[in-house]
Image (cartoon, helix red, strand yellow):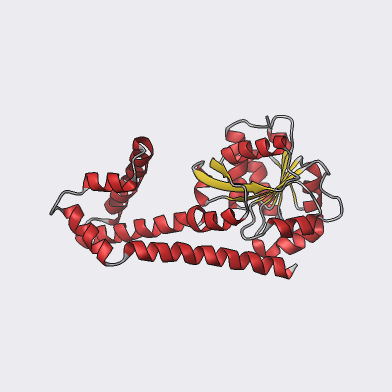
Amino acid sequence: MLQDIKISFIGSGVMAEAMIKGLLDQQLLPVQNIMASDVRPERGEELIAQYNVQATQDNRRAAAFGDVVILAVKPQVIGEVLAELDGGVIRPDALVISIVAGVTIARLLKGLQHPAIVRVMPNTPAQVGMGMSVWTATPGTSEQQRAQTKTILGALGEELYVNHEDYLDMATALSGTGPAYVFLFMEALIDAGVHMGFSRRVAEQLVLQTMRGSVEFARRSRLHPAVLRNMVTSPGGTSAEALYQLEKGGLRTVISKAVWAAYQKSKYLGSLGNDSE
């Protein structure tokens, strides 16, 4: 599906590289059909050495190159990037995909004056092909372009289309920020293991494999998490005691409040971006 199209990246950070790697690993398009732009010349040299893609410091050149233009810059520079790309630089029939956090479709439409725009909320496990990308599209995005989006995001892991941009703020709080919650829980478990007397190396091994195995068990069994939890919990046993302490400490409430706070923060940051344009 992507063999005949050209993809350009405006911004060549970690997520852009993850997308480049995924596209090439799955042989979705030839390497000469990828161009990456970055203000740092050394970054372009790194990408050429690692992937043999085309590289440039000229965002306008990269934008004109692509049938698909992926915006992957930091949120704080999106204003100047949009101004740089305004004025018909992007091909009229091109697809624009934005993975810039907190930047709304309304802002992108206003800044680019371009009809076919997809906004994506990816997450960091995309770097190992295990990401979760939630996306939505403007009415001006064709069915073919939507199919291309699914293929591109599929190179990062799983993808999910939502029919309203509001869901992206929710996804930001749940799957976008979610890895941070998981890593904090892992860190706490590892520290508890060290406190009991394990070496940090052994504690990390136990926790990492326990997390990995639990997730895979949940995926394969397709059972509700509460059912799986009860399978591990014997009356009067160690799991029951540990879970009692977690519930007593308000773990569920704290998690719910944290996710809600992230959701509100995402909406607030998005409103700042719109007001600033």
Q: Find residue 102 and report its image quarter.
A: bottom right
Q: Is residue 273 visible?
A: yes
The quarter of the picture where the C terminus appears is: bottom right
Q: Which sits in the foreground, 13 or 175?
A: 175
Residue at image coords 69%, 40%: 53
Q: Find residue 80 and report its image quarter.
A: bottom right
Q: Which sits in the foreground, 268 or 208?
A: 268
Query: Whole-percent x and y of residue 173?
Result: 50, 59
Query: Whole-percent x and y of residue 208?
Result: 34, 48
The quarter of the picture where the N terminus appears is: top right
Query: Whole-percent x and y of residue 26?
Result: 58, 32
Residue at image coords 49%, 52%: 175
Q: Find residue 54 and report its image quarter.
A: top right
Query: Whole-percent x and y of residue 77?
Result: 70, 63
Left or right, residue 111 beside residue 133 = right
Q: Which sits in the foreground, 165 or 11?
A: 165
Left or right, residue 200 beside residue 132 = left
